[in-house]
Amino acid sequence: MNDKQKVDNLESLRKRVMHADREALIYFLTAEREEVLSTLWEWSDQVRRQHVGDAVHLRGLIEVSNYCAANCIYCGIRAGNHHLLRYRMEIPEILTQVRLAVKLGYGTVVLQSGESSRQMPGRWVTELIRTIRSECDLAITLGMGERSRDEYQEWFSAGANRYLMRYETSNSGLFHTLHPGHLGLESRLNSLHLLREIGYEIGSGIMVGIPGQTWDDLAADLLLFRQLNLDMIGVGPFLPHPETPLGSSYLEGQVFTPGAQVPNNEITTLKTVALTRLVCPMANIPSTTALAAVDVKSGHELGLSRGANVIMPNLTPTHYRSLYEIYPAKADTGEAAEHYDSRLKARILALGRHPGIGRGDSPNKGVRTCEHNPEH
Ligand code: 5AD
């Protein structure tokens, strides 16, 4: 192939990716040649700039409780991990961290927890949202797992704006293996549907390289992002946690099938982030903490340069953080939020970007009712 043919060929592949063609997605996911990869990085950065601009929105993450009734086989705070001290923050304690988010100029707090109706009763969450709303003008994002429609509705009416719930994999067989006791992928997707119907901005996402995931699965995960027309999409590598069934067998080398299996490495995660930006140009996409955990030095920057436009600094008080290890938290140095914040902002400016001002709502929300055309 001469140079012109190569360029034409890449251009036609780009169009196919923008139209979410599965084979074109797999082509880029498995690509190794430097010229193909640099083209993917350039495209994703261009599309990011064109659709969501240069602002990097900062969301203050507060891990309000690690109680969890679910037993996801990859997650460190699963109910079956009995080596963990469980906590639920008090509302005034949470409010102190929300005030810190306001002081640092963040437009959103993300209240995250395990999934536990018993330890996190719906009413308690409602009171928490009302208390924050009565005092602070920022967007409230929840990530509290699957709850009832009435609870989603009550929390929305109390002032919550967005909800994060990853589907983790679009392969229903694999979903079933990963989530023992769960009703299944359909039920997870139905929750997302309910949340959207109520009026939340909805976010979802996956883990890259979760054992059992094939290239075909990963391409299907990307197609589902687009089909769900998500406002927020989180993508991070699977990180084995030794106190979990999946993590311990992975660490013993028992569950990796070379060839078919997607690796849980940085480059594959970055390719997935870049392709996510191409298939969902207007979504808010974080450069995730898990990505920063596999590359402490430059994971966040690489994510931001390859499609991401959001970072979620951890505002959980340091003494609770070690109890919220969904995966081994190598990246978390326990640094106080204020120090981390000033370093982070400097890193964002060094990239030629700037911290976002205001809530940083999803640009996708305004056009959701229009026909979805990723090229405009
Ligand atoms: N490695 C990477 N990500 C994980 N999550 C949970 N456990 C792990 C792990 N071991 C992710 C899931 C979940 C989100 C809160 O964290 O995708 O939805």
Image (cartoon, rainbow, N blue to C red):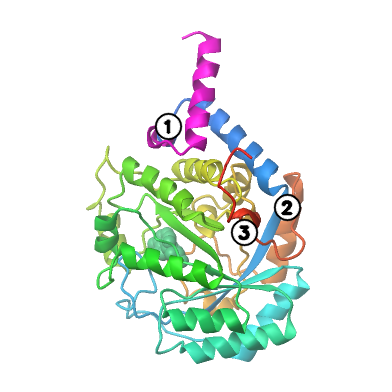
Image quadrant in which you'd find residue 117: bottom left
The vertical placement of 260 against 14, above or below, is: below
Residue type at mark 1 is: Ala
In the rendering, which numbered label is found on residue 365? 3
Instruction: Tell me which segment is drawn in magenta.
Output: 1-26
Which disc, if any, is residue 24? Answer: 1
Q: Residue 191 vs residue 256: left or right?
A: right
* Dominant secondary structure of the residues highlighted in magenta in the image: helix
> Is any atom of residue 10 visible in this view?
yes
Find the distance from the CA under tag 2 to the CA under tag 3. 17 Å
C-beta proximity under 8 Å, tags 2 and 1: no
Choose the circle earlier in sequence order: 3 or 1.
1
Q: Is residue 16 magenta?
A: yes
56 left or right of 188 in image = right
User: Which is in the foreground here, disc 2 or disc 1?
Assistant: 1
Say which mark, if any, is on residue 55. 2
- Tag 2 near tag 3, CB within 8 Å: no
Q: Is residue 327 visible?
A: no
Asked if the stretch drawn in magenta spans residue 168, the answer is no
Residue 273 coordinates in the image, percent (x, y): 52, 46
Q: Nearer the viewer, mark 2 or mark 3?
A: 3
- Say if 42 sits above or below 90 in the image: above
Q: Nearer the viewer, mark 3 or mark 1?
A: 3
Query: Mark 3 belongs to which amino acid?
Result: Lys
- State the image coordinates of residue 107 (x, y, percent, origin top left): 71, 68
Nearer to the camera, 59 or 277: 277
* Relative to 272, 79 lies left or right: left
How packed is label 3: few (under 14 Cα within 10 Å), some, or many (20 or more)? some
Q: Residue at horizontal 33%, vertical 46%?
A: 217
Which residue does the image show at 51% across and 54% down from the upper left?
Answer: 229
